[in-house]
Amino acid sequence: MSGDPYSARGNRDRSITRDGARGTPLPEADGRTEAVAPGQPYLIGEAMTGGYGKGADILHGCTISVDPGEIAVIVGPNGAGKSTAMKAIFGMLSLREGRVLLDGQDITGLSPQERVVQGMGFVPQTHNIFTSMTVEENLEMGAFIRRDDISVTMAQIYELFPILKDKRRQAAGELSGGQRQQVAVGRALMTKPKVLMLDEPTAGVSPIVMDELFDRIIEVARTGITILMVEQNARQALEIADKGYVLVQGGNAHTGTGRELLADPQVRRSFLGG
Ligand SMILES: Nc1ncnc2c1ncn2[C@@H]1O[C@H](COP(=O)(O)OP(=O)(O)O)[C@@H](O)[C@H]1O
Ligand SMILES: [Mg+2]
C-alpha cells in the first residue's frame, strides 16, 4: 500500500466509483496517458503570482497541481482567486512570478490555444457555450483544432450525456442549466484533452443534477483524463477529490487529500459549515 501513490484517493470510495476501473483509456485516447511518468504532477501551476493587466496581484505564490489521472479540486470563498488561478494555468493571465508545467514541459509562455494543442481543455465559469448555436454546433466548435474525423468523439460525448443527443438540433441557450453545463463539458472534451479544467461545473444546478454531473466527471476521469476543477459545493467536491486545495486571498490556505480536508476541523469550521 505504501508504494501506491494513489492509495488515499477519495474517489476510490466504493460508494462513489462504480467499478474501480479507473485509468482505462478510451479507445481513441491513443494510450497517451501511459506516457506520463508516475509520481510526478501532470499539471502544476507553481508559485503563481499575478493579476489582471497592470492591476494589483490577485494570486500570491499560489501552487496548484494535479497528478496523472486524478481529480484535484479547488475550493474557497468568493473572490479568493480560484477562477484567476484557473485562468493563469490556462494562460489567460500572464504571471509575474511562477510557472506552469504540463507533463514536465514548461508551458508558461504558451497561449491558451497552444495549450489546447498540448492537451489542455478548459470550461470557464461563465460564457462557456454559444447560446445561439445548436448543441451539435457547439460540439463542432469545440473541435476547432482538429483536422481529423470528430464523429467518434462526438458519439462518445453523446454516450456520456445522452440528453445532448436528443437535443442536438436545439439552440444551446434553450437548455436547462445542467444541460448547458453538459454542453460546455462536452465542447471541451471534443479536443480529446489529456487534462480537463472545470470552473464551477455545477453552478446554479439542483442537488440532484449536481450529483449527476459529478458522476459524469468521475466517469471522464476513469477514462484516464486528469481533472482540475473549482467547486463551490465544497463538501461534495472534496468527497470525489484525490487532492484538494483551499484558496484564501490568492494563496494556499490548506492542501491535502479530499478526505484529509473533510476531516480537518479548521477547514470544516471555516469552509464546510462545521
Ligand atoms: N477580469 C478581471 N479584471 C480585474 N479583476 C478581476 C477580474 N476577474 C476577477 N477579478 C478580481 O480578482 C479577485 C479574484 O476573483 P476570482 O478569481 O474570480 O475569485 P473566485 O473565482 O475565487 O470567486 C477578485 O477580487 C475579483 O474582483
Ligand atoms: Mg470563480
Image: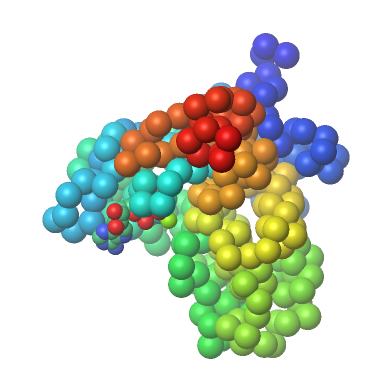
Count every numbered label the image shows and give the total.
0
Residue 255 percent location from the top left of the image: 48, 29
Relative to 174, say whether 233 is above or below: above
Residue 169 percent location from the top left of the image: 69, 87
In this picture the colour scheme is: rainbow
Tell me the quadrant of the picture where the N terminus can be found.
Answer: top right
Tell me the quadrant of the picture where the C terminus can be found.
Answer: top right
Answer left or right for 212 relative to 200.
Answer: right
Which one is nearer the viewer's eye here, 187 or 110?
187
| Residue 27, visible in the rendered structure | yes
Residue 168 percent location from the top left of the image: 70, 82
Answer left or right for 195 relative to 162.
Answer: left
Which residue is at 54% across, 70% downward?
142
Which one is nearer the viewer's eye here, 74 or 161?
74
**Residue at the right extreme of this rendering:** 19
Q: Quadrant of ligand 1?
A: bottom left
Which residue is at 58% across, 65% downward?
204
Answer left or right for 155 relative to 108.
Answer: right
Which residue is at 46% across, 68% downward?
126
